[in-house]
């Protein structure tokens, strides 16, 4: 029986969630990582830096990064890049409420709900 194979990145950005437990009563370290090829590194970087979810993770103290792989002399070599809060666009929201509002506005249709009277011809008015 064929299986359905669907893969979707978390929030369209991340492939891996990394957890490092701290056993001595400290705080566990969490990181979100995008894994890609070296040729796609810059496009994935732009995608992460434009993501409101990634900025919220950074505000919350979670590490956000990208790891790209390139084959050099018959061995795969990784390149890591970690982002800080200062790297993200300042227009992105820093609260969950602001992110939800931004997403809600993005889903609104661009219809002219109210037209000014000068755009409506007098013969089109039914009354």
Image (tube, rainbow, N blue to C red):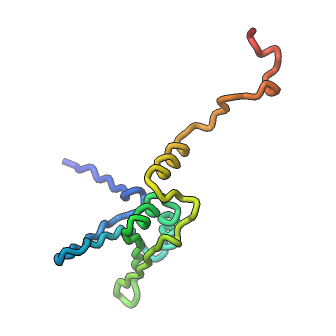
Residue at 77% across, 16% down: 124
Q: Is residue 91 left or right of residue 119?
A: left
Q: Position of residue 105 (x, y in %)?
A: 55, 43
Residue at 29% across, 73% down: 29
Q: Position of residue 17 (x, y in %)?
A: 30, 66
Residue 18 position (above or below residue 115): below
Figure label count: 0
Q: Is residue 124 left or right of residue 98?
A: right
Q: Position of residue 87 (x, y in %)?
A: 52, 72
Residue at 76% across, 28% down: 116
Residue 98 position (above or below residue 76): above
Residue that lies at the very extreme toward the bottom in this rendered image: 73
**Res 26 quadrant in image:** bottom left
The quadrant in which the C terminus is found is top right
Near-viewer residue (9 or 125): 125
Q: Is residue 44 left or right of residue 3?
A: right
Residue 79 position (above or below residue 6): below
Q: Position of residue 76 (x, y in %)?
A: 35, 83
Residue at 63% across, 33% down: 111
């Amino acid at each position: 029986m064929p299986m359905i194979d669907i893969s979707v990145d978390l929030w369209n950005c991340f492939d891996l969630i990394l957890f490092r437990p701290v056993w001595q009563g400290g705080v566990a370290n969490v990181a979100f990582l995008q894994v890609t090829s070296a040729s796609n590194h810059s496009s994935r970087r732009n995608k992460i830096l434009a993501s409101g979810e990634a900025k919220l993770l950074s505000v919350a103290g979670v590490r956000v990064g990208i790891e790209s792989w390139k084959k050099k002399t018959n061995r795969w070599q990784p390149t890591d890049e970690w982002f800080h809060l200062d790297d993200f666009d300042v227009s992105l929201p820093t609260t969950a409420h602001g992110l939800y509002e931004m997403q809600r506005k993005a889903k609104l249709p661009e219809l002219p709900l109210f037209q000014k009277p000068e755009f409506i011809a007098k013969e089109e008015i039914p009354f």
